[in-house]
Amino acid sequence: MSTETKDDQSTFSSYEIFVILMLALTQFTVVLDFIVISPLGDMLMKSMNLSTAQFGLSVSAYAFSAGLSGLVTAGFADRFDRKKLLLFFYIGFLVGTLFCGLSNNYLMLLAARIFTGLFGGVIGSISMAIVSDLFPLEKRGRVFGFLQMGFGASQVFGIPLSLYMANAWGWQSPFLMIVGLSIMVWLFILFKLKPVAEHLEDQNEQHAVVHLWETLRIRKYRIGFLATTFLSLGNFMMLPWGSAYVINNLMITAQELPFIYMASGICSLTIMPIVGKLSDRFDKFFLFTIASIILIVVISIYANLGPVSFWLVLIMNLGLQVGFLSRTVPSTALTSALPKKNDRGAFMGINASLQQISGGIAAAISGMIVIQKDKFSPLEHYDTMVYVVVLLSIISVLLLWRVSKLVKNENAI
């Protein structure tokens, strides 16, 4: 291999940098819209007098609708320019988020979350398909690492700002802020992103439903889907209860809460590029396993804490970030190596749908496991929920091992 080829594989062109930035900004807005409901959870449950089951449903409603939308669109995903698909679903996401910001009761909020999920839940799979089309596998770990920084950035900047706005102007205001930012991102995509349509050259004449069915019939794809399902079940189960647990069980004040999310976000921004580079350099499954072990240890301790100091809660949350997010990059990179080019849109659509549906199931189940006697009482059975997450994490390691073997056997990495 020539030096020039090595340089091409190790560096990014100016346009590739632009694509990464654009997709990261897109991920930032979509992720913030989804995860902001967790730090707002304690405020929402108190202001609307919601039970844990109702709040769990408000989280899972987005995930279920996103999963359904992903399955419906997966068969069509490889038949259009991915730029046009991204623009279409992003404008729907904008409208849904606006409805969230205008909601004044639980039923309106629930309907708005369902509508937002129908559009927002597909954006991630379109972004992953764009990355798979434009970047070789040798660069994909770093690209996915940068995209995951959208999650960290939403915690460093988005969530603290959202909490400040919610305390000042009500819980609806963060959603209106997301709308304003997303309008600028949409225009950025419209005028700057080139068409992503090379995959159309390899298309056959299958009907969209047939294409979806044929994608589901491929055995190695199904193993990847199963790995995604169990990984997402474990990732989403703890997510809705972040603020409620630290405020009502660990006795952290509402004023201290933004600093915990900010520190966790800084940790994410720091570690994601590192994990991305390590994922391109070393065995992806090995990194995933190490991250899973870290996660299991940290959440087992975290679930059994009582009222403790702010600094201990901060350190434990940083450990949670390292464990959860360090699994995401290698698992995403490995799974993205399974589909052929003309199956990527359908594969990524189904995969994203399973992530969302699994997340909805996880949030709904955790809402039934965790109970709260009144809106100021500690959450009960939180430790039981965490032990379920431990079991799911062990299963996900076994399944990703299968994915890793399939990818290696085909000399894909």
Image (cartoon, rainbow, N blue to C red):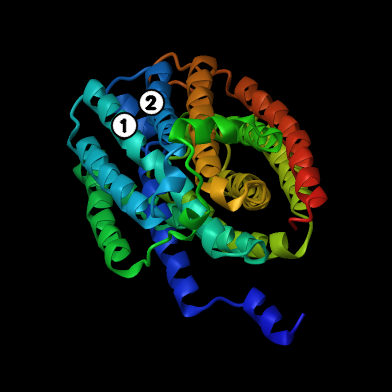
**C-beta proximity under 8 Å, tags 1 and 2:** yes
Observer-nearest of 10 and 213: 213
| Residue behind mark 2 | 61
Asked if one can make out residue 186 in the rendered structure from this viewpoint, the answer is yes
- Please state if 295 lies on the left or on the right of 70 as rendered: right
Element marked by disc 2: helix
Observer-nearest of 317 and 256: 317
Observer-nearest of 316 and 377: 316
Quadrant holding the C terminus: bottom right
The residue that appears at 42% across and 17% down in the rendered structure is 53
Point out residue 138 in the picture as x, y percentages from the top left corner.
68, 65
Q: Is residue 199 above or below residue 289?
A: below
Point out residue 130 in the picture as x, y percentages from the top left corner.
48, 57
Observer-nearest of 406 and 248: 406
Q: Amino acid at mark 1?
A: Arg
The residue that appears at 32% across and 29% down in the rendered structure is 114
| Residue behind mark 1 | 113
Point out residue 238 in the picture as x, y percentages from the top left corner.
55, 32
Point out residue 327 in the picture as x, y percentages from the top left corner.
66, 47
Q: Which quadrant of the view contains residue 230? A: top right
